[in-house]
Image: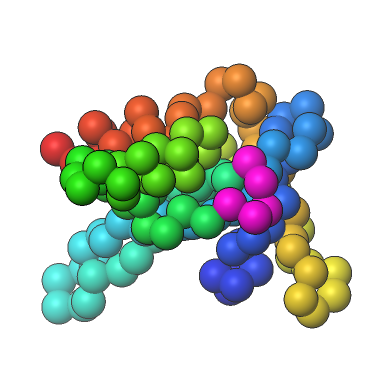
Amino acid sequence: MRLADLMGARVLDATGRDIGHVGDIRFVETSGPAGEPTRLRIEGLVIAPRRSSRMLAYDHRPVTAPWPLTTLARRATRHALWASWKNVASRQPPSTLGEPGTITLRQNASDLSLLSDMHAHWNK
């Protein structure tokens, strides 16, 4: 799997409804066996409702100051969703170069967490 095949991919919920595109991918480091380097695994996907949305890294942690950035960050991420990688039912790579792939989730969009709700969990 290539990261480029996931970024920008269309995301469908369990009902087949188009709920946005992959705006970012969150990785976590896991320890490898003794003497081996740590590995990265996908924890989940940030789903942006519009293709033109740009998270500008505001999905990584909440922005609290200065106020213009706080306002922009809230506006950019207010409708973004979080989908755990465990909830990915299937992924279709792009059929042609330069086109987005498609990811289908096991959950309905209404059952996904808002990205803003995940910040408290990530930034403990």
Asked whether 55 or 20 is in front, the reply is 55
The answer to whether 73 is drawn above or below residue 117 in the figure is: below
Residue 6 at x, y percent in the picture: 61, 62
The answer to whether 108 is drawn above or below residue 57 in the figure is: above
Residue 118 at x, y percent in the picture: 34, 34
Quadrant for residue 47, please give it.
Answer: top right
Asked whether 37 or 59 is in front, the reply is 59
Majority secondary structure of magenta residues: loop
How was the colour assigned to the protein in this rendering? rainbow
Magenta extent: 49-53
Residue 103 visible in the snapshot: no
Residue 88 at x, y percent in the picture: 60, 43
Residue 57 visible in the snapshot: yes
Residue at horizontal 48 percent and vertical 44 percent from the top: 76
Residue at horizontal 34 percent and vertical 65 percent from the top: 40
In the displayed structure image, the side of residue 34 where residue 83 appears, left or right: right
Residue at horizontal 42 percent and vertical 59 percent from the top: 56
Q: Is residue 38 magenta?
A: no
The residue positioned farthest toward the front in the image shown: 68
Quadrant for residue 123, please give it.
Answer: top left
The residue positioned farthest toward the top in the image shown: 110
The answer to whether 115 is drawn above or below residue 91 in the figure is: above
Residue at horizontal 19 percent and vertical 45 percent from the top: 65
Residue 63 at x, y percent in the picture: 25, 45
